[in-house]
Image (spheres, rainbow, N blue to C red):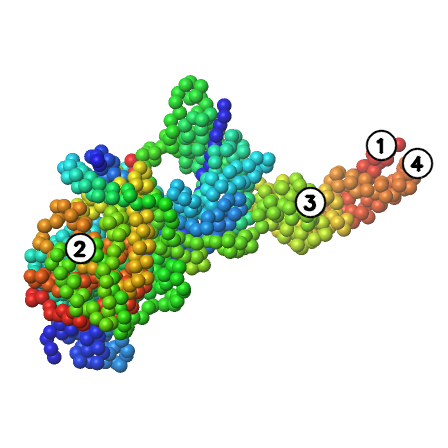
Amino acid sequence: MEIKIGLELHCQLTGLQSKLFCPCRCDYRGMSPNTNICPICSGLPGTLPLLNQRAVDYAGMISIALGCKIPSAVVFYRKNYFYPDLPKNFQITQYNAYGFTSIGVEGKVDYGVKSSTIKRVQLEEDPGRLVYGNSNLDTLIDYNRAGVSLVEIVTEPDFSEPKDVRIFLNKIISIIEHLGVCDTRLDGSVRCDANVSLEGGNRVEIKNVGSFRDVKKALRYEITRQKTMSVRDIEIKSETRHWDDARSITKQSRKKEEEEDYRYFPEPDIPTIVLGDDYISSLKTKMPELPHERKTRFLRVYGLSDHVAQVLIDNKELADFFESTVKIYPSSPNEIANLIISDLLGLIDDSKKEQRSIFSGLRIDAKHIAELVRMIDQNVINRNIAKMILSQITKTGEMPSYALDKMNASVIDSKDVISETIESIFKSETSAVKDAKQNPNAANFLLGKVMQLTGGRADPKIALKLIKIKLAVLE
Amino acid sequence: MVSKDEIKHLGWLSRLELTDKDLDRYVSQIDEIIRYFDKLDTVSLVGNEPASSMKKVSELRKDDIHMFEGDPLEFFKNRKDGFVKGPKMV
Amino acid sequence: MENNLYHLNAEQVASGIKNRDFSAVEYISQILERIEKIDVKINAFVTVDNEGAIEKARSLDKRIQHGESIGGLGGVAIGVKDNICTKNLKTTCASRMLEEYIPPYDATVIKKLKENDAIIVGKLNLDEFAMGSTTEFSRFGPTRNPWNINYVAGGSSGGSAASVAALECAISLGSDTGGSVRCPASFCSVVGLKPTYGCVSRYGLISYSNSLEQIGTVGRTVTDVMLIMNAIAGEDANDQTTRTTVPGTKTTSRGQTPKYSLQNKRNIRVGLVKELVEGADPLISKCIHSAMDLLVGSDCKCEETSLKSVQYALASYYTIAMAEATSNLSRYDNIRYGFDSNPEEYEWNTYFTKVRSNFGEEVKRRIIIGSYVLSAGYYGKYYLRAQKAREMIKREIKSLFEKYDVLISPTMPILPFKFGEKIDDPLKMYQIDIDTVVANLAGIPAISIPVGFNDGLPIGLQIMANQMGEQTLFDVASSFESTIDIHGSPKI
C-alpha cells in the first residue's frame, strides 16, 4: 500500500538577537512570564511591526541551502484566526496563492540516495504560550515567545517510510546547524508536523509532535491506524490529529481547523521587500560552509575516506571538534578522525546525545586529542594504550602525557599490556628469543627488556610467566 | 444575493454575536453594499503596478535588542501571577 | 491682558508666548474656560486634561522666565483625536472596546508635538474606530456643528474640526482614511490636511485601514496647518511605511524631516475634476465655480479635466478599508485591554463573541463585510479587483499631474445635513465620501479650505497635489485662502 508523508517544520531563528517584528529579546527561555514583551509583540493598539533585517538574511540563507528559488521581492500576509496565544488574533506570515512571494519555493534536499522536494520556505512569527492552570476556570497566557522569528519549511508528500523521514530530518538539522541560524538543541527550537495519507486517500495532519524521535513513532502509529481502518473498509477522514506522547497515539483534534477561512491578504504595515541578484549573491558569500561543501573539503584537504567524512559532518559538533584538533596538530588528520569516531564516540553517553552538547560530561577538548595522537605518532604509546588513556582522561580531564606518567609510575599487572610489551620485544629481539628457547635462563634477558620498556613497572612474576608461555608456544 | 447563513458564518469567523434581529437588519444593508461593490467586476486583473511601499533589506530594522522601558505587566488588565488571564479553553 | 486669547491662531500664540506678550498659563486657562463653557453645546471633547495642560503651561512659563529656548509650537493648545495614543491619557476610539484603555506609550506625532512644546488640552470625539462620516457613531454622542448645532459636524474627526472652529483649541490632530479630516474641516469651515501616505508616522494611530490612513492636521489657517506639519512630518523608525521620497523617483533627503514654508507660487496650473464637480449639489458646484472665477488670473490657469477611473473609487475604497478593518479589529477581545469584565468560567469563543457584541452597529457591519470580501470564494472578485482599481486610479492621477500642479474639487458633494438623515442608510452615507477617497487611494496629499457658505452652512474647496507635494499644496492653498478671504467664527 502506497504511503505518502509530507512534513511541515517550524524552525526558530534562535541565532538572532531580537524578535521578528520588535526589538525584544529573541531568547525568552527562563524568563518570568510577560517580562520579555513590548507594545508591539503584545498586540497593543496603535503598534506596527518592524521587520528584522537579519531575519530576512537568515531565512534567505535557509532557502538557498535548501536549493530553493528566491523571488525578486518578498511580501508578508496576514493569516486571520482567533486563538488565545495570538496577540493580534492574526499571524503575520507568508503565502503563495496569489503569486510567488515567500522567501523560497521549489527546493530540493538530498538525503542518502533519495531526495525530497521543498515546496516552500516562509518567514513568520511565533505565537505566545498557553499555560493551563486550573483549566476549568481560566487559561493563562505568556507573550514572551510571541513574535519570535520562525522559518516554516514545507515538503511535498514524497516520503514513503518513517525511517526516511528521520534521515531527512537529521540532514535538515545538520544544514541548519551549519548555517548557524538556529541552535537545534534548545527546547522547542525545531518543531515538526507531518501529514500522512494512504494510496491517494484523505490526508491526515499530525500536530504537536514533541521531538524528532517522536516523529518516527507518531508516523508509525498513524500509518498503522490508517492501514487498519483501510483493511476494515472504514473511511479515513481528512482531519487534524494531535500526537499524545503519554499514550503514544494520535487523537482527534478538538479544534475545528478545517472550518477556518483564514482570509489571507497582504500585510499593509510591512513594505514589499525588494531582494535582487546583488542581495542574493551577497547572502551566498556571507553563508557559512554547508555540510556537503564541508565534506568535499574534508575529502580533498584531509584525505579522509568518504565514510569517515560523512560521519563527521552528520554532526556539526563532531566536525568542528575534528577541525579544532587538526588545527593544533595538523600532521595526522586521518588518525585524529579515526580516534574520534572509533574511540571517542564510543565513550559518549547515549542519553546525552540530545542534550546541549554531545560531549556533555566528557572533560576533554581538542588539545587532549591532539596530544594523544601526537604521542601515537611518536611511538610513545600504541593505539590500545591510547584508548585506555582516553577513557581515563575523559573522566579526569588530565592531559594524556600526565595520565601516562601516572600510569608509568604504577605497577602494570594487566596481562594484556604486558603481553603486548612482550609481543613487541619478541619481534625486535629475535636472537634473544632464539637463545631463550634453547636456554630457559636467557628468558631473564627478555624479562629485563620488558622491565626496561615498562619503566620497571611491569609485574615481574606475571611477565616471566607470560614470557615462558610464549616461548613454549613458539616452535 | 448575500444570504443570512453567509452573514451568520461571517459573524462566527469574526467572533461577533449576531441575534436573529441583527441578521435580519444586516442582510439587506450588506447585500446592497456588496451589490454596489460589484462595480469592480469590470476592472481588469491584468497588469502589475509597483507596490506603494517598497524597501531594501538594508533599510529594515537592525537586529539589536532594545527592551521596553517600564513595566510591561502594566499593559494588561487581567493578570494572575504574571500571566494574562483569559477564559478557559473547551 | 486680553481675555479672548482663544481667538488667536497657532502662529500668533507661539509668537505671543515667545515674546512674553502673555504667559502660557494665561492662554491655557482661557482655553480651558472656553472648553468648559461651550463644549456642552457641541460635544467635541471626550477627555479634557485640565491638570496636565496647566502643569505643562506652568513649566513652560518657568523655562521662558529662565531664558531657555522653547519649541516652535510653544504653548499652543492642541486637541488630539481619540484614536491617537497619548501616554497615561485615556484613549478610547469612542468605543466600549477601549473604554478603560490607557496607553503606556505616546504616538510618534505626540512625542514630536511635546518636543515642540505644544500643549495637549484633551482628546477629541470621533466615529467609533474612525468609521463614519458624521461622528454620529460615537459612544459618547455626536459632535455638533458649531455653525448650527442641529447639523452634523462631519466625521470621522468631527471633534477635531468642531473644536478648532469653536475656538476650543488652536489646532488639532485628526486621522483621514477616506476623508475623515477633510470632511469635517469642510463642514466646519476650517482648514484640514491629509498628508501624502507615508509622510507622517502612524505609530500610535489605532489602525482602521492601514494602507489608506494618515494622521491629518486641522487649523483655522493654512499657515497653522503647515506649522504642525513641520513638527510632525518625517520618516520614523517605528513605522516602516514612512518615507521622504516617492518610489521610482530620484532620492532626495532620506530620513530627514521635511520643512515647509510659504513660497510664492507662480504659474499655477489647476485641473478641475469635472466628475466630482458635476456630481455635487448644484449649490456647491456654483460656489466652486465662483471661487475659481476669483482665483483665475495671470498667475493661475484653470481648466476642466476628467478622472475617468473615479467611477471605481468608492467601491475600491470601501472594499480595501473594510478588509483591513476586519483584521485590525480582531485584537479587541477584552482580554488585555477593554472594559471591566471577568473572563473566568467562560469558554474562550463564547467570551469573544459576547464581548465583541459591544462594538457599535457600523463597526460590526464593516467587520462582516470586510470578512466577506476577503473570504476564500470572494477574494478575487472583490479585494483583488479593488486593488487593481486602485492602481488604475493612481496611474490616471499620476498622468494628470504631468499637466497640472494641483487638482481641485468640492470637498463634499453635499452641504452639512441634520442629524439622523443618513444614519439608517449605510450606502447613502458612504457615497458622500466620493470626493475625498481618491486622495487616500492614490496616496496623494489633499487639503480642504473654506470656500463659502450656503444659508449659514459651510462649503469646502479641496485641493490635491502629487505625492510628497505638500509644499505645492501649502503655497496654492495659502494663495487661494487669501484671495477667497473667508474669516469669522461661529457664534457659540
Marks 2 & 3 on one chain: no
Nearer-the-camera pick, C18 or C50: C18
Q: Which residue is mark 3?
A: A304
Q: Which residue is mark 2?
A: C278
Q: Amino acid at mark 2?
A: Glu
Instruction: Tell which subunit mark 2 falls on.
Output: C
Q: Which residue is mark 4?
A: A438
Gap in Å between the C-alphas at discs 2 and 4?
132 Å
Quadrant the C terminus of chain A occupies: top right
- Residue B33, image x and y in percent? 20, 43
- Residue B76, image x and y in percent? 28, 52
Gap in Å between the C-alphas at discs 4 and 3?
48 Å
Mark 1 surroundings within 10 Å by alpha-carbon count, few (fewer than 14), some (14 through 19), many (20 or more): few
Label whose residue precedes the other's in the sequence (4 or 1): 4
Instruction: Tell which subunit mark 3 falls on.
Output: A
Nearer-the-camera pick, A164 or A278: A278
- Residue at coordinates 33% horizontally, 51% vertically from top-left? C391
Q: Helix, strand or loop at disc 1? A: helix
Q: Amino acid at mark 1?
A: Val
Gap in Å between the C-alphas at discs 1 and 3?
40 Å
Q: Are marks 4 and 3 in contact (CB under 8 Å)?
A: no
All told, the count of numbered labels is: 4
The disc placed on residue A245 is none
Marks 2 & 4 on one chain: no
